[in-house]
Amino acid sequence: MYLSPSLMSDEKLQGCQSPLVLVVEDNDDSLLLVSYTLELLGYRFIAQRHGWTTLLVAQEYQPDLILLDIFLPDISGLDVLRYLKQEQHTRHIPVVAVTALVDHRGRDWMIELGFDDFISKPYLIEELEAVILAMLKQKFPLTSVLELCQE
Ligand code: MN
């Protein structure tokens, strides 16, 4: 599968076993902020701007975490979540909703819908970091991430 280089993390990171995060975001500014945060953490990432391609990329790359925008140009993030959770090869991947879509039901509603966590836009980089770290801490204890990339 061809992926534009600008939508993937630095080449030198690709060979390392640091967490791989799939970022689904159609807004360039938001995408830039998330990419920057993931680079700070030393994580690898792949970005997608559309829902349908996200399903294919998730299957093929088996990311450790998916950060999912709700308003996408084709299908909604809620549909993406539904398909991901229906599919045997992607249902185990934690999915965090990243969206400005907030009403009084807020985070609880997102969890009810099947997301593993929720972060509302606009957010501080530290908040995004905290959510990502919390999601990945079991599979990747904090101290191990840098060690994974030092060879
Ligand atoms: Mn959007």
Image (spheres, grey):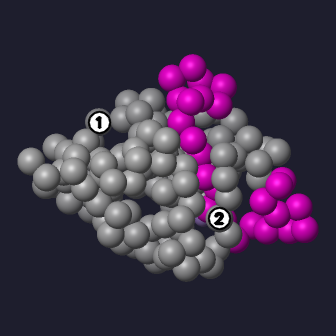
| SS at circle 1 | loop
Q: Quadrant of the N terminus?
A: top left
The residue that appears at 83% across and 55% down in the rendered structure is 108
Which comes sooner in the sequence, label 2 or label 1?
Answer: 1
Q: Is residue 86 above or below residue 146?
A: above
Q: Which residues are magenta?
A: 85-109
Q: Is residue 30 visible?
A: yes
Depth check: give the residue in front, 120 or 144. 144
- Left or right of residue 108, residue 9 in this image: left
Q: Amino acid at mark 2?
A: Ile
Q: Check if residue 95 falls in the magenta segment.
A: yes
Image region (quadrant) for ligand 1:
bottom right
The residue that appears at 35% across and 64% down in the rendered structure is 41
Q: Amino acid at mark 1?
A: Met
Residue on which disc 2 sits:
119
Q: Is residue 48 above or below residue 123?
A: above
Q: Is residue 94 above or below residue 150?
A: above
**Label annotation for residue 1:** 1
Q: Position of residue 47 (x, y in %)?
A: 40, 55
Dot 2: few (<14), some (14–19), or many (≥20) neighbours within 10 Å?
many
**Label annotation for residue 140:** none
The residue that appears at 57% across and 60% down in the rendered structure is 131
